């Protein structure tokens, strides 16, 4: 055991605690400052521990955590129509100031280059992506998340899961350097693993499935799911872990607002993005976070357990876990799950907490979901037989130690009003299984059709995805050209489209948007055996005009499909197959009502941005329109604590749609690659269904939506996660579930 000593007085008489022996140095140890009450007992860092080398004083590697409590998820009844109010947030939001009129036009004009980013500081230098060898690692396909079975499965009406979040060390980056690496890469060592957070399960033997991106939850339509979500962000001794990005926790935000840096346990609350019919007690309301059941934070865990159980005994809550129910009664589609904690969603997702959630009529193992669709997906067949590839495209930056890098705010040089840190654009694309695709993810394919389920899982980047047989080089134009490989679009986040769309050469995906496409490698020229998935979206948030120009070749290249010489197993995606599939898609689309009831309310909202003294963005807001001056279109910003928007109940309808209306002066092709409607009959167009849509600056977007027949408290927000965390999220009510705001003691939804 390391002896305690007084800092700066090692080996001297009178030092409080044990003295350091000869050859030892008194070193600061933050972990040693945590007392039994879970608080920092040494805020002034007066005391340390004796060690030979202070660099060796690091947090212990996570030890195996005991497997879940035998018996699985406690019995639960179906969701109660009276869900609980949200749990208290980590810190009350500041009282909202008077709402001044904010003009959306204060943002820089589209296409105008932004100012240079403010200074940032990091623990280590940012890694140059040129130090990483490209296309050396295989694409790892996400397996299926294991369900509870046997005696552990207690509720036959549900598919049951027990999924925990843990901190792990994972090989993320290629372990070799390119032969033409620049001189600055000489000292870079590519072999260290990367610390990430990951969802996963634990079996009776202690074997885990924790990995980033996480295993895929496969749901059968109309068979409800029940998931026990467990926060296991603790060390090997059961003490809570501080946030991986503790220095990046923004102290001006409503969740982590404080005068000192937050060093407590990490709050989590999972959310299944796009889940329809879910009650608010299982939707992952952003204030309904829960802490790990840590040995040095027991009092808070017990408080949350008592509060949850007292308000809704129909669902199981306890220290470090919650139980959520998902009805899955929606069109077959591609959803995804991720953390949604108030004010730190951007950091928790960036750390790795995300995975796919597929809803299907039946799992396509022996036959396709629809005639003509390539199958099967990964999980139940050998990898070489897989023809459906789930691809979660995420961007990350790393430091020279192979650790995740996220820019910090430099409080010494950055004006306090500039709350949004800017830094190097994460240059590393990480499609499934967390390796750099441009550093090298390679997927061997045959000359036949493949189905790609693409998710833009980036925090803030917009993707413009296309395929080419040419690998971009520095200075080459990044745009579809004669080497482009066409493809067809089958669906989006709303499920299958009314008909097949294509051939197309690109799709435009904002953050959280998904596209379901079919690409036929048999159509690739016989002389070409490599197809590159490329992105011509910008390194900065998309304004509709700033597409990539090919000069940043590391941001351009996403992954490589390596066509094998083996003969094809399945027929090509020819006209006959496409016609069969398109007919099946229309029948599926028409199998449920496709029109919305008349709207009962029409509301106008604004998306607003404020800028700091340096000209950089400081905060984003959702707002309303000043009705006293409609001609001037003044926006009134709304804070988290502003009055909650209430949406009246309307008739339930299983479809929705949206449409775009442009603004004079913006590019006509601003949304090229976004599919808003498709043919659904003779001379008829049907709006597609979506749960997320890209809204460029200066555009007005009309969204038609339905609200379910269940009172509840939900949120609406921007899915640029940095915007969401910086105030661009707001609660809304469906009906009046009778909640009281825990901060104001006023009715929440009256």
Image (tube, rainbow, N blue to C red):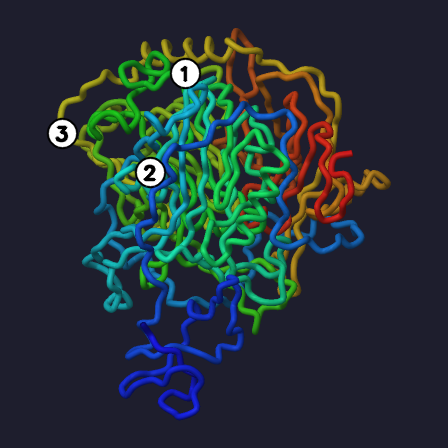
- Identify the secondary structure beneath mark 2: strand
Residue corresponding to mark 1: 361
The local secondary structure at tag 1 comes to loop
Which residue occupies the foreground of this view, 185 or 503? 185
- The residue under the point 46% across, 15% down is 499
Residue for point 30% across, 33% down: 143
Q: Residues within 10 Å of mark 2 (few under 14, many from 20)?
A: many
Callouts 2 and 3 close, C-beta under 8 Å: no
Q: Where is residue 666? Give x, y as percent.
A: 61, 40
Using the image as rendered, state which of residue 426 and residue 146 is in the foreground. Answer: 146
Is residue 121 positioned above or below 515 on the image? below
Residue 470 image label: none
Is the residue marked by circle 1 packed among few (<14), some (14-19), or many (20+) residues within 10 Å? Answer: some
Q: CA distance from mark 3 to mark 1?
A: 35 Å
For the C terminus, give its image quadrant.
top right
How many numbered circles are shown? 3
Q: Which residue position is annotated with label 2?
A: 533
Among the two numbered marks 3 and 1 on one chain, the one whose residue lies closer to the N terminus:
1
Q: Position of residue 603 (x, y in %)?
A: 74, 31
Of the numbered discs in the image, which one, if any, rests on residue 565?
3
On-image quarter of the N terminus: bottom left
Point out the tag, 1 or 2, that comes first from the N-terminus.
1
Which residue is situated farthest in the right direction here? 628
* Mark 3 Cα shell of 10 Å, populated few (<14), some (14-19), many (≥20): few
């Amino acid at each position: 055991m390391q002896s305690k000593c007084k800092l700066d007085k090692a080996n001297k008489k009178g030092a409080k605690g044990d003295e350091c022996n000869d050859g030892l140095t008194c070193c600061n140890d933050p972990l040693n400052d945590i007392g039994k009450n879970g608080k920092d007992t040494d805020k002034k860092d007066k005391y340390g521990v004796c060690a030979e080398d202070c660099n060796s004083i690091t947090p212990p590697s996570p030890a195996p955590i005991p497997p879940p409590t035998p018996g699985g998820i406690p019995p639960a009844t179906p969701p109660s129509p009276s869900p609980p109010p949200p749990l208290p947030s980590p810190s009350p939001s500041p009282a909202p100031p008077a709402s001044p009129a904010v003009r959306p036009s204060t943002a820089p004009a589209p296409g105008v280059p932004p100012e240079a980013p403010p200074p940032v500081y990091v623990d280590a230098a940012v890694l140059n992506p040129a130090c990483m060898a490209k296309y050396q690692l295989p694409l790892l396909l996400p397996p299926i998340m294991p369900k509870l079975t046997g005696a552990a499965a207690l509720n036959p009406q549900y598919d049951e899961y027990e999924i925990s979040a843990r901190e792990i060390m994972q090989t993320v980056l290629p372990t070799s350097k390119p032969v033409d690496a620049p001189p600055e890469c000489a000292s870079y060592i590519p072999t260290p693993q990367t610390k990430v957070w990951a969802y996963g399960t634990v079996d009776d033997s202690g074997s885990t499935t924790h990995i980033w991106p996480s295993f895929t939850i496969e749901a059968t339509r109309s068979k409800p799911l029940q998931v026990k979500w467990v926060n296991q962000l603790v060390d090997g001794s059961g003490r809570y872990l501080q946030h991986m990005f503790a220095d990046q926790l923004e102290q001006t935000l409503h969740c982590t607002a404080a005068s000192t840096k937050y060093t407590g346990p990490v709050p989590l609350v999972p959310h299944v993005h796009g889940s329809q019919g879910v009650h608010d007690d299982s939707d992952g309301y952003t204030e309904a976070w829960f802490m790990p059941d840590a040995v040095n934070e027991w009092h808070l865990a017990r408080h949350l357990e008592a509060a949850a159980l007292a308000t809704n005994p129909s669902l199981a809550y306890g220290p470090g876990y919650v139980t959520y129910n998902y009805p899955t009664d929606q069109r077959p589609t591609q959803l995804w799950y991720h953390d949604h904690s108030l004010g730190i969603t951007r950091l928790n997702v960036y750390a790795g907490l995300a995975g796919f959630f597929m809803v299907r009529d039946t799992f396509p193992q022996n036959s396709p979901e629809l005639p003509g669709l390539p199958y099967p997906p990964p999980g139940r067949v050998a990898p070489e037989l897989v023809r459906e590839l789930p691809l979660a495209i995420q961007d990350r930056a790393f430091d020279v130690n192979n650790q995740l890098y996220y820019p910090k705010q430099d409080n010494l040089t950055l004006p306090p009003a500039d709350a949004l840190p800017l830094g190097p654009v994460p240059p590393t694309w990480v499609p499934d299984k967390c390796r750099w695709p441009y550093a090298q993810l390679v997927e061997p394919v045959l000359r036949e059709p493949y189905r790609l389920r693409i998710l833009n899982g980036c925090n803030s980047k917009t993707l413009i995805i296309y395929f080419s047989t040419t690998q971009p080089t520095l200075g080459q134009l990044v745009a579809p050209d004669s080497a482009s490989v066409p493809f067809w679009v089958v669906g989006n986040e709303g499920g299958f489209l009314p008909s097949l769309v294509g051939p197309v050469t690109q799709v435009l995906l904002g953050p959280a948007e998904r596209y379901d496409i079919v690409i036929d490698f048999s159509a690739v020229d016989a002389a070409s055996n490599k197809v590159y998935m490329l992105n011509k979206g910008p390194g900065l948030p998309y304004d509709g005009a700033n597409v990539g120009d090919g000069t940043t070749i590391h941001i351009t290249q996403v992954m490589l499909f390596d066509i094998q010489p083996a003969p094809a197993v399945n027929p090509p995606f020819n006209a006959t197959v496409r016609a069969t599939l398109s007919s099946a898609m229309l029948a599926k689309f028409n199998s449920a009502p496709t029109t919305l009831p008349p709207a009962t309310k029409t509301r106008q909202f604004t998306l607003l941005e404020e800028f700091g003294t340096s000209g950089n963005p400081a905060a984003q807001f959702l707002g309303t329109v000043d009705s006293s001056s409609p001609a001037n279109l003044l926006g009134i910003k709304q804070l988290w604590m502003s009055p909650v928007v209430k949406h009246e109940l309307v008739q339930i309808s299983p479809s929705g749609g949206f449409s775009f209306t442009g603004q004079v002066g913006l590019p006509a092709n601003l949304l090229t690659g976004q599919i808003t409607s498709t043919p659904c009959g003779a001379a008829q167009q049907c709006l597609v269904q979506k749960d997320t849509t890209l809204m460029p600056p200066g555009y007005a977007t009309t969204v038609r939506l339905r609200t379910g027949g269940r009172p509840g408290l939900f949120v609406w927000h921007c899915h640029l996660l940095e915007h969401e965390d910086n105030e661009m999220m707001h609660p809304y009510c469906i009906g009046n579930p009778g909640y009281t705001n825990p901060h104001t003691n006023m009715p929440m939804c009256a």
